[in-house]
């Protein structure tokens, strides 16, 4: 038998022959270059080499920049104020305008010190495990970390660890906390963190619309959190979201109309944020594109499989508890969006939420005719459908819609 070194040398020569024949090397392959993949694999087969899978494409990934503090445009704050290091801009015009008209001239001298103070106190309060959950998150009430400067310093002070620990609290005890007699414990940390720290359009909505409503997430902030805890940061967040979605089904909660309404709204907020998350290319990339095509399929499958027992609880819940079956709809739409992003980002076509969730009969039809087209439309348009758009989607799917 040939030695290992000789075998590797022989394989390398064969690979070079395949590359020379096609003009394509393994390093050139991306998930969206199907013709080149097939061409190279045919050449590799001809010289006795195994097939290769393409790698995730990276060319279109957005740079890791904060939002512009002037106009609010995301991922373009390439210019940092050298005086305070706490304000970021997409260009000189925004910097000059923010200096003259946006209040930065008055705040610049003290902004760094104030940003650091705000960041430190915010992280300390979020990390204070001796306080009830509601007290811990009250510090986020006025959105102290909306600005790129305070958020940057908060990360330095351990914000990502604080987020991880908060998700852990909900993963392990969100139902128990909501059935506690002390109202200060009846709070979902996951809801607060996702809607405050991970929401997008923080500045642009105020600049252009004069309000704090939003319909996007900040993919950069999500990316930062997941990369800070690569082993299980996503898993803890996902499980906390699943547990939090079930609180309104608890007999003690569902028996109290006010509490049931509040906890149902809590679940809606969290899972609406997950639809925004998978409508974001950047957020979807950092969640799904881990190493290669197989890893993408494995992670996506894990996420959807985790949803199965929770979806079963929703399907068997007493009629009227899940008002309008809204949470059940989210639990169908999010897997559809995960599958769509796997196809788009990694050419993974074998992921089948219907099989993973074991959907049959009416539940399967709801997924195929309602959840899937709505999820795919949201990814294309990067926003949720309004009533008229939703009717149009349903008509195209062959679902009868009354006027």
Image (cartoon, rainbow, N blue to C red):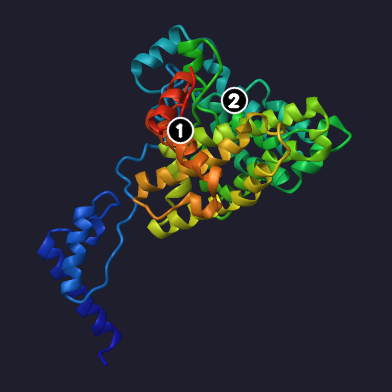
Asked which quadrant contains residue 94, the reply is top left
Circle 2 sits on which residue?
115
Q: Is residue 68 something one can see in this rendering?
A: yes
- In the image, taking residue 318 as reference, residue 304 lies left or right, namely left
Between residue 329 and residue 394, name the one nearer to us. Answer: 394
Kindly identify the residue that appears in the image at 23 percent across and 84 percent down.
6
Query: Crowding at label 1, few (<14), some or many (≥20) Cα neighbours within 10 Å?
Result: many
- Give the label on residue 374, or none: 1
Kindly identify the residue that appears in the image at 25 percent across and 58 percent down.
27
Q: How many marks?
A: 2
Question: Which circle, 2 or 1, is nearer the viewer?
Answer: 1
Tag 2 secondary structure: helix
Kindly identify the residue that appears in the image at 65 percent across and 26 percent down.
118
Q: Position of residue 106 (x, y in %)?
A: 53, 10
Between residue 235 and residue 366, name the one nearer to us. Answer: 366
Q: Position of residue 39 (x, y in %)?
A: 17, 60
- In the image, taking residue 35 as reference, residue 296 lies left or right, namely right
């Amino acid at each position: 038998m040939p030695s290992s070194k000789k075998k590797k040398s022989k394989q390398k020569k064969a690979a070079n022959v395949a590359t020379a024949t096609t003009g394509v090397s393994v390093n050139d392959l991306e998930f969206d270059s199907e013709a080149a993949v097939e061409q190279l694999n045919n050449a590799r087969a001809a010289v006795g080499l195994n097939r290769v899978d393409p790698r995730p494409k990276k060319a279109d990934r957005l740079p890791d920049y904060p939002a512009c503090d002037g106009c609010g445009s995301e991922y373009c704050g390439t210019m940092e104020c050298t005086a305070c290091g706490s304000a970021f801009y997409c260009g000189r015009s925004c910097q000059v305008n923010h200096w003259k008209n946006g209040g930065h001239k008055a705040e610049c001298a003290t902004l760094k010190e104030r940003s650091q103070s705000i960041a430190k106190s915010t992280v300390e309060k979020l990390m204070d495990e001796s306080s009830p959950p509601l007290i811990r998150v009250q510090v986020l009430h006025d959105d102290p970390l909306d600005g790129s400067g305070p958020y940057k310093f908060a990360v330095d002070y351990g914000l990502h660890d604080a987020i991880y620990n908060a998700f852990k609290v909900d993963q392990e005890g969100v139902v128990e906390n909501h059935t506690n007699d002390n109202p200060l414990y009846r709070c979902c940390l996951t809801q607060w963190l996702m809607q405050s720290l991970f929401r997008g359009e923080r500045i642009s909505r105020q600049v252009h619309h004069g309000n704090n409503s939003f319909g996007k997430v900040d993919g950069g902030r999500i990316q930062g959190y997941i990369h800070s805890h690569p082993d299980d940061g996503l898993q803890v967040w996902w499980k906390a979201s699943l547990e939090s979605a079930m609180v309104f089904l608890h007999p003690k909660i569902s028996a109290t109309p006010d509490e049931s309404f509040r906890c149902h709204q809590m679940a809606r907020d969290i899972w609406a944020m997950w639809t925004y998350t998978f409508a974001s290319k950047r957020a979807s990339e950092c969640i799904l594109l881990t190493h290669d095509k197989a890893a993408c399929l494995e992670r996506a499958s894990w996420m959807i499989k985790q949803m199965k027992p929770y979806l079963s609880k929703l399907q068997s819940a007493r009629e009227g508890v899940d008002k309008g079956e809204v949470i059940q709809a989210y639990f169908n739409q999010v897997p559809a969006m995960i599958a769509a992003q796997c196809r788009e980002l990694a050419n993974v076509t074998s992921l089948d939420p219907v099989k993973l969730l074991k959907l049959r009969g009416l539940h399967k039809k709801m997924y195929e005719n309602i959840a899937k087209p709505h999820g795919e439309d949201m990814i294309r348009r990067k926003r949720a459908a309004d009533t008229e758009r939703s009717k149009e989607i349903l008509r195209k799917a062959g679902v009868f819609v009354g006027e």
